[in-house]
Image: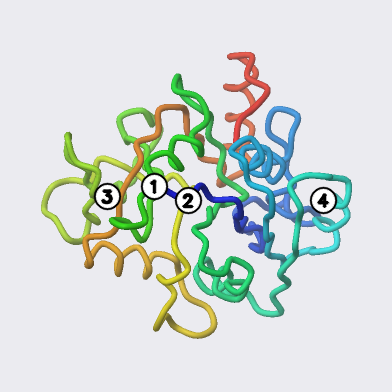
Amino acid sequence: MAKVPKKAFVLAAGKGERMRPLTDDCPKPMLYVGGRTMLDRALDALEEAGVEEVVVNLHYLPAKIEEHLAMRKTPRITFSREEDLLDTGGGVKKALAFFGDEPFYVLNADVVWTDGPSGSTLKGMAAMWDETRMDILFLLHTTKDLPAYNGKGDYYLADGTDQPVFRGRTSTPANYIFAGPRICKASIFENSPEGAFSFLELFHRAEEKGRLYAYRHEGEWHHVGTPEALTETNRILAAKGQKRAS
């Protein structure tokens, strides 16, 4: 029987420079969407999925995040301060001892998504997780549901398969974007770089081994990279009467 992750890492250290001036004195994960901070939405989703302990990394305006999360009772929070930004891969690696040999979630604190008709997205990922076949299981969202998106996509995922192909490794146009949440094993960090590096390197390695799998997102996904996008996301959620997103 698959191990259901009970621990998680939430990436919250970035400076959010594209969100200025909103982030001049506020960490990006502390910005509000639908009356809740993006960081709390991530933690709420993890708590709903049964996660009990979470590491949150800090760098930019760390005291504001620590003060805010001091008011939360659950899940239990451990902070990982970074003197220099370690990027998405290096940040998780710094706290790797926290997870032992257990699988764990990694979430971005500045991604906004909603659950679909099947219920909790993270629970769905946990139900699909199979450590005998997978090193990483991540959430992908179809580009067809993003009318304002004008990027190239991240991965091609064919119908009837759960194994995505990175856009640089196929001539077929990428039809999905990486949506943020992932489940992974600590062993993926073996022989990984020291210091700052991107989690994308770990995705590539897992794909090369045939151990990168995708969970198709059924809900909505919102890009909140700029103040204008944040305003639009709040407008959309308010119009649909959605108070909770992740």
Badge 3 element: strand
> Dot 3 corresponds to which residue?
155
Residue drawn at the location 47% of the way across and 75% of the way down: 197
Q: Quadrant of the C terminus?
A: top right
Residue drawn at the location 30% of the way across and 46% of the way down: 153
Q: Amino acid at mark 3?
A: Tyr
> Dot 2 corresponds to which residue?
3
Badge 2 element: loop
Q: Amino acid at mark 2?
A: Lys
Q: Are marks 2 and 3 in contact (CB under 8 Å)?
A: no
Instruction: Say which of marks 2 and 3 sits in front.
Output: 2
Residue drawn at the location 67% of the way across and 55% of the way down: 54
> Dot 1 corresponds to which residue?
129
- Image quadrant assignment for residue 132: bottom left
Is residue 193 shown left or right of residue 228?
left
Q: CA distance from mark 1 to mark 3?
A: 19 Å
Crowd band around label 4 with a 10 angstrom C-alpha radius: few (<14), some (14–19), many (20+): some
